[in-house]
Image (tube, rainbow, N blue to C red):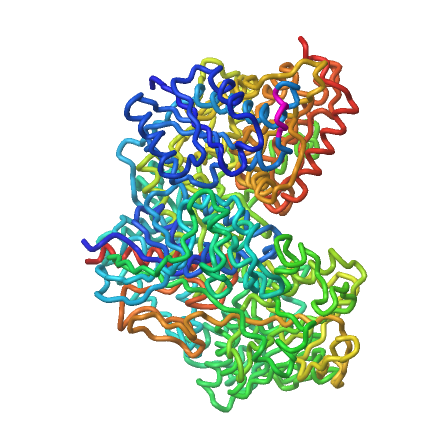
Amino acid sequence: MGNKSVLVVGGGMSGITAAVEAAEAGCEVFLVEKNSYLGGRVAQINQYFPKMCPPNCGLEINFQRIKKNPKINFFTLAEVESISGEEGNFNVTIKLNPRFVNENCTGCNKCTEVCPAERDDDFNCGLSKTKAIYLAHPFAFPMKYIIDANACQGDSCGKCVEACKYNAIDLKMEPQTMTVNVGSIIWAAGWKPYDIGKLSNYGGGRFENVISNIMMERMAALTGPTQGKILRPSDNGEPKNIAFVQCAGSRDEHHLKTCSSVCCMATLKQVNYVREQYPDANITIYFMDIRAMGKHEDYYQKVLEEKNVKLIKGKPSEIKEVPETKNLLVLAENQFTQEVETLEYDLVVLATGMEPATAEDKVPAQLNYDVDGFVIAGPPTPGIYAAGCTRKPGDVASSVQDATAAVLKAIQSTVRR
Amino acid sequence: MDKKYGVYICTGCGIGDAMDIDTLIEAAEENNVQSCKTSPFLCGKEGVEMIKKDIEEEGINTIIIAACSGRVNYDVFDFGSDKIVERANIREQVAWVHEPDGPDAVDEEEDHTGRHAADVIHMAYAKVKSMELPEPYKVEEPSKAILVVGGGMAGITAALESANAGYKTVLVEKEAKLGGWLNKLYKVTPLKAPYTELEDPNVDEKVKELEEHPNITVYTSAKIKKIAGAPGMFDAVIDVNGSEVQERIGAIVLAAGSQPVDAEKLSHLGYGSYKNVVTHAELEEMAKNGKIVRPSDGQEAKKIAFIQCAGSRDPERLPYCSHACCIESLKQAAYVSELNPEAMTYIFYKDIRSSGTYEHFYKKIQETGAVFIKGDITGITESGDGTLTVESEDVLLGGKASVEGVDLVVLATGMVPNTAFGKELEVEADDEGAADEKEEKGTQDVIIASDILNLDYRQGPELPALKYGFPDSHYICFPYETRRTGIYAAGSVRAPMDMAKAITDATGAALKAIQCVEATAQGAAVHPRSGDLSYPEFNLNRCTQCKRCTEECPFGAINEDEKTNPLINPTRCRRCGTCMGACPERIISFKNYSVPMIGNMIKAIEMPEEDEEKPRILVFACENDAIPALDMAGINRLKYNPWVRVIPVRCLGSLNLVWIADAMSEGYDGVLLMGCKHGDDYQCHFIKGSELAEIRLSKVSETLDRLGLESERVRAVEVNIMDYMKIPQILDEFAEELEELGPNPMKDF
């Protein structure tokens, strides 16, 4: 009988699911997450389609499951450095990056109040700032603050150290390493939104009012940079004419070759965000195919019934900015009319796809990857499984299913030997 | 348990600045506590050591932590499972949400924040005083065997995956041969990277693996006659070719599959009238036989048109998308050109839904020369020679498309779950009719008697169906959430899905079934209260056979005997307490959650006299969403009135109306229920707890009116976890309305 413990790499929806499902099936679990909090991408999402319910609700339940289960050991700011051994007996070295805040932190916020330095808030896609010592987001679990070493002024300032009554701040904290021995590994490192900066023909990263769908999620979220108000980044104006561009950097030989499977539904959902705030706004969706799978078709049909929502079949070739207004001109061949049209919008949302984290950051073991960078589990290193968007692009429910399935495979690896 | 109480008050994080701690200690000591101590940093090393020392030296075993929310520092204040620990939240829900008391507040009796904190401690004391440590309900010799119903791709997968993890598995298939739909397939859509290559169904290989597996028992030509019992102790009676066998089962995977939409319904596409219009399945059969021909004359079919969404995405037939048909047609187009490189293929579609990595497959088929035409079909006509003309809109080229001389039209038929066939069980309607029934009992589950599981459950023989007859989960985060504990649906019976997805789904469902048998063996609950060892106990001597508990249990956990006595199945129970809330005789209790316990909490606060002009508002808040929202209001330092007193409940479904009566007679000026959204997109994790609470509330208003109490004093509000910004408004507006009504006239009685 091998080691009946499982390492889960990645603390997003798939990783959290794998960890709790494995622990509730009786396994000892180590969960490592590179961010300072668990929750991953879904923590940034405002609402789930099609129920329009808040992701924090499901995360809360999962966090309760983690809190109540002594079999789960989780580590934030942690990264896997190396893997040795074999199925049933892996030794894994994990690097723990410094938080500069220790377990004494009570989350009282006094440190942030006195901190003079600022940083771009990556949780809000850089649309706002935080102090150098900050809580990653209001629902962050664990609720412990963190210092961004690049923004912190260090010893020369030390105001937070002074303000903290609980000796929770340690500006000299060093990285540490630890080793765990496990029977199997589930890699659930998730995905990155495709970098809109690479979509130069769309002005991604250059035109302020060309945003990504993840930026849209943050703007629509109460915890986001605009407290939930959808605004044009250039002037905080209320958008009246909004375009969504599907498959922006997906299904594209020059970018992501595959379909990310979620962006169609994500856009239909975001149409509802806009509609709720701006009942009269005009919304245009440029698309190739609307992939509202299964029962999601109902949701699509409802959006089609909306007033002022127009679909144009066609992938824009170019987006230009009007310098005076910062409005956008979208050039596309409308395949419905066979005409090349240039239409003006005050906000353009690029429905960017998912790039697996493993496209760049490979698993430190001998594994195969498909053409898109997703992990193909199995030989030459059996016992390492991929879950969620490390295996395939997918929505939340599919990723949870996938992670649950990966747990059974991981358990098989621990009983096989 | 012989309880020795300790109260530990933290003065850090602004608590000490918000109230007079000496007064708080005095208040805490009014209760029969053996130790009451404070710490400026209770969660720090010294604070925790102080508590541990009391545990060791004073034998303290019942601990009240008056500090932060139980959502944080849960690990720091864990003193072992033999201790009772209660978190009195005086940080997020007191010190951080009220204005701090001034230096002379106590003398001037303006110490509203301090009084709130004291009441929170009193309520925590009343709670732990009324509870015992739960003792798990253990089944004698629980079965850990997994029953898989259905021997298609999903069922085979679930059985093999469970067995490979070491679990005994019983597979029941209604046909003589295992394999289900796979038996009818010539090729299978790509299941692995690079997602471009067709695969063989390999049924025989899979069947062999199953039949030779030491952990698997296979019954073919078999159907389930009856499943009685509960997780860990199901008794399945299986009819195998006319003779009966019985199996003891721990948990069940329902993988009964789907079938193509009734082709009779596709007459608008020429099916039934033109011989050369065939279904997807009929083409598979031809391909399996090696030759794709025109049924009209047996000639080789050279020009083949595929019509997508045949019966799907069609409000008159199947409104939903059947998920798999696009890639199934791509697969057929692929093998058609493999079998006959001369063949021409046309695909008429609305959208090509080769979602995710099947994009590669779509691309490959596009490169083979298949012609894709986007548009709705406008007509199919037959010529004298049996060939067909397919006409459609042509959205991309403008105008209309017309393809003549088509040898074979293939309808990409959608799928209908096997659970959708059968009589929909009607709600036991009284004379008032179904509308009144809904008002009375809330949204009723749809159960279709599909003759698959034949559960011996009071609430019906099959899994409740969501939309379109699929027994799916309603939760995005929890796709394996089930309304019948220990029974997990997987594959195309659960939702429309392709083969690859069904394999994953079945593997996941098998894991959930394994989890359930393991939890049941420990006497623990499964999701969402995973690990909870408490369970409801019934004092049946006082039962009046009113059936409320058996009807309202969202999980069908309670059966009835012939005299309508409730028969509880603890291993089916999810511990929400809906039965406890439903029971008018209050005979249902958990060791650590009961009607008297909450009643004592209600009575534990110090109720100000009427002339003090300090109203009191009782809030029952759902632990899952409303309590975190209240905490978040605190974390954001939002301010609201200090009149509120919050009691967390497992689910609003556990709300017993006697608590409203208790609150009113105790002198509370108003009662507010905070629960999850209900309706079609309900968010209640116990299905309809908040809805049931509101229904109960509607009944109480008449009583209140009769007593001369305004029914506006008691109300329910939907609060989800993201509604924290609205918390002050909700609480303050309610306080204002109550002020207008004036104090509760029963206050000084």
Inspect this view and state whether residue A160 appears: yes
Residue B355 appears in the figure = no
Q: Is residue A106 left or right of residue B700?
A: left
Place residue B424 in its image quadrant: top right
Of residue B13 and residue B474, the one placed in the foreground of this image is: B13
Q: Name the main secondary structure of what is drawn in magenta.
A: loop
Residues B101 and B661: in front is B101
Is residue B653 or residue A161 the one in the foreground?
A161
List x then y, in percent, for residue A303. 71, 61
In the image, is residue A325 above or below residue B681? below
| Magenta stretch: includes residue B105 | yes
Q: Does the magenta stretch include residue A279?
A: no
**Quarter-wise, where is residue B82 in the image?**
top left
Quarter of the figure with the N terminus of chain B: top left
Which quarter of the rendering shows the C terminus of chain B?
A: top right
Q: Which residue is drawn at 34% across and 23% down?
A: B60
Q: Which residue is drawn at 49% across and 61% down?
A: A152
Q: Residue furthest top?
A: B749
Badge count: 0
Residue B36 drawn at (x, y percent): 42, 22
Q: Is residue A411 left or right of residue A15?
A: left
- Tell me residue B715's x, y (percent): 69, 29
Q: Which residue is drawn at 27% across and 62% down?
A: A92
**In this picture, is B704 found above or below A137?**
above
Start-end of magenta stretch: B101-106
Residue A382, image x and y in percent? Answer: 27, 67
In the displayed orientation, state which residue is furthest to the right.
A280
Q: Residue furthest bottom?
A: B342
Q: Nearer the viewer, residue B201 or B466?
A: B466
